[in-house]
Image (cartoon, helix red, strand yellow):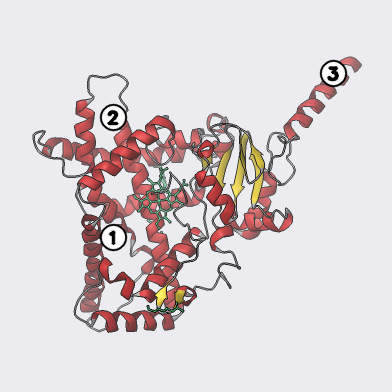
């Protein structure tokens, strides 16, 4: 018995020591506990600050590190956070860090496979990224085509507001801005993908949008409980968030399949494709006979999901921040209004070509982007090889994610960063954006 207990103690001690030992020259961060790593520590900071990205601010105060790189571990996953502008830039330009995570969480979204466009790497990423870019360019979406769609949606927004006033019978109306933009924003992407736009009041689309918003609020891109502790999905499918996650995605795919079906029925093979869905269907048909083609219907559905997610929340929230602060500070609205009337008169809508004559409006857009990305993370990368970042060692398969607060809320580049202040960009009557302004990321993953 004595021997057995000693033996067990030795084994347990070895496991504890191994589990809490960090790789050589790993970026600074909290001590690791056996099996859970830094999960507890981060969870505590998160509940103290309310947001995961603000918990990283706390790390920045504790682990004084001029490179702005922090090393964590959640369950079995090593996670490095790039916090400074320099670290985010180096992350985007180091090809060894071009991978995307392999975790169960990401695959769960896409039929258990690593497909789609947002969270894939290697050949699949390159092939489909090139395909999507080429086709969007062919449809004219790289230039005027896209601008026409956006300008049209903007006019629809104004029309909606005017109808509200007409209904109220006065020059004033109360608008719930909370859900005001999201269908208009989605239409910009949906139009290029499927050729259709939705009515702002479409029940089906609103429901799907709200479902994803709620889902993403609960899980955010850095992961759910089941993603860091994958076995939990078998032990506690409900509690770990797994079951809901799968069910809700199934609902989205059902919605999408209807659209794919409609395209299949209307598509004439002898004609040019009219939108991205047509292009994909045509490519799928071309590859029908080859077994190893990546142009299959599941990939098409996954690409649609990814573009839907990547394009709707980001733009919607950036607009949300801009309008929130314009509401809180009517003087910003007044300045914007003066600029618009002096440049355009009251005769027409602004267009992209007016941008350089509307520096203050341009500055509002940049503040909206800064506030949105300054409160969130980028899309996680993964080390494809053992590599280095800001002088630290990053072991193969480590997840590396940008926490954009460090760059976009940096008090040196953006004095008084929590103040929404378009004037910070206005110099000599133009909108001058600081060098360290990369809300869309840096490098080959940037769109
Ligand atoms: C306010 C607007 C937006 C912001 C701030 C934003 C920001 C970002 C960021 C930070 C990344 C990660 C880059 C990286 O991994 O290094 C990203 C990736 C991506 N974004 Fe956006 N985005 C916006 C709008 C859009 C829109 C409208 C679309 C189009 C549908 C889109 C599609 C994508 C895609 C497909 C990726 C993955 C690219 C890849 O891995 O190759 N985004 N975005
Ligand atoms: C996800 O699906 C479940 C079951 O269908 C539903 O009860 C839940 O409300 C959905 N979640 C969201 C955020 O819509
Ligand atoms: C759009 O942004 C607002 C915040 O401005 C948010 O309340 C709403 O849920 C968002 N909608 C979607 C679909 O993300
Ligand atoms: C301000 O702009 C004008 C013309 O746009 C230019 O001639 C002048 O050099 C600029 N001044 C500064 C200080 O940049």
Q: Neighbour class for label 1 at 10 Å: few (<14), some, many (≥20)?
A: many
Q: Secondary structure at mark 3?
A: helix
Q: Name the image quarter holding residue 418.
A: bottom right
For label 2, the crowd category at 10 Å Cα-Cα, with few meaning under 14, some 14 to 19 and many 20 or more, is: many
Instruction: Tell me how far mark 3 sits from mark 2, CA to CA.
Output: 55 Å
What x and y, as percent, mark residue 242? 49, 37
Q: Can you give x and y, in whole percent of width and height, for residue 363 in the image?
A: 41, 71
Q: Which residue is painted at 59% across and 64% down in the image?
A: 410
Instruction: State how far apart marks 1 and 2 are (Cα).
Output: 30 Å
As rendered, which of 225 and 73 lies closer to the eye?
Answer: 73
Q: Is residue 446 above or below residue 174?
A: above
The quarter of the rendering in which ligand 2 is drawn is top left
- Marks 3/2 in contact by CB < 8 Å: the verdict is no
Which residue is at 22% across, 31% downward?
283
| In the image, the residue with mark 1 has its CB under 8 Å from the nearest atom of ligand 3 | no
Q: Position of residue 244 (x, y in %)?
A: 45, 40
The residues bearing labels 1 and 3 have C-alpha atoms spaced at a distance of: 65 Å
Residue under label 3 = 7
Q: For mark 1, what is the residue?
A: 184
Residue that numbered label 2 is attached to: 295
């Amino acid at each position: 018995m004595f021997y057995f207990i000693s033996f067990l103690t030795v084994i347990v001690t070895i496991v504890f020591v191994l589990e809490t030992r960090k790789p050589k020259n790993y970026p600074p961060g909290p001590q690791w506990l056996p099996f859970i790593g830094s999960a507890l520590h981060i969870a505590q900071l998160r509940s103290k600050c309310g947001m995961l990205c603000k918990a990283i601010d706390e790390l920045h105060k504790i682990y004084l590190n001029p490179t702005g790189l922090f090393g964590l571990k959640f369950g079995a996953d090593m996670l490095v956070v790039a916090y400074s502008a320099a670290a985010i830039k180096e992350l985007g330009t180091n090809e060894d860090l071009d991978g995307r995570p392999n975790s169960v969480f990401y695959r769960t979204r896409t039929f258990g496979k690593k497909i789609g466009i947002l969270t894939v790497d290697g050949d699949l990423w390159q092939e489909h990224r090139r395909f999507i870019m080429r086709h969007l360019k062919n449809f004219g979406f790289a230039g005027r085509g896209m601008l026409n769609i956006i300008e049209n949606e903007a006019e629809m927004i104004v029309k909606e507001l005017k109808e509200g006033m007409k209904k109220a019978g006065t020059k004033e109306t109360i608008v719930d801005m909370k859900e005001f933009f999201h269908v208009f924003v989605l239409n910009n992407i949906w139009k290029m993908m499927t050729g259709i736009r939705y009515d702002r009041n479409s029940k089906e689309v609103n429901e799907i949008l709200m479902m994803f918003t709620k889902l993403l609020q609960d899980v955010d891109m850095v992961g759910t409980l089941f993603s860091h502790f994958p076995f939990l999905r078998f032990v506690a499918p409900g509690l770990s968030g797994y079951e809901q996650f799968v069910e809700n995605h199934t609902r989205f795919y059902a919605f999408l399949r209807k659209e794919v079906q409609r395209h299949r029925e209307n598509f004439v093979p002898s004609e040019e494709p009219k939108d991205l869905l047509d292009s994909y269907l045509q490519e799928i048909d071309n590859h029908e006979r080859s077994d190893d083609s990546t142009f299959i219907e599941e990939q098409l559905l996954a690409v649609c999901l990814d573009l839907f997610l990547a394009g709707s929340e980001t733009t919607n929230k950036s607009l949300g921040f801009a309008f929130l602060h314009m509401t809180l500070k009517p003087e910003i609205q007044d300045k914007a209004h003066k600029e618009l009337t002096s440049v355009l008169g009251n005769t027409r809508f602004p267009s992209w070509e007016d941008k350089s004559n509307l520096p203050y409006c341009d500055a509002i857009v940049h503040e909206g982007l800064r506030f949105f990305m300054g409160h969130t993370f980028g899309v996680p990368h993964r080390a494809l090889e053992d590599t280095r970042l800001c002088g630290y060692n990053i072991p193969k398969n480590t997840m590396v994610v940008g926490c954009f607060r460090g760059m976009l809320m940096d008090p040196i580049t953006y004095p008084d960063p929590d103040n929404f202040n378009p004037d910070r960009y206005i110099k000599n009557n133009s909108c001058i954006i600081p060098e360290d302004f990369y809300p869309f990321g840096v490098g080959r993953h940037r769109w």
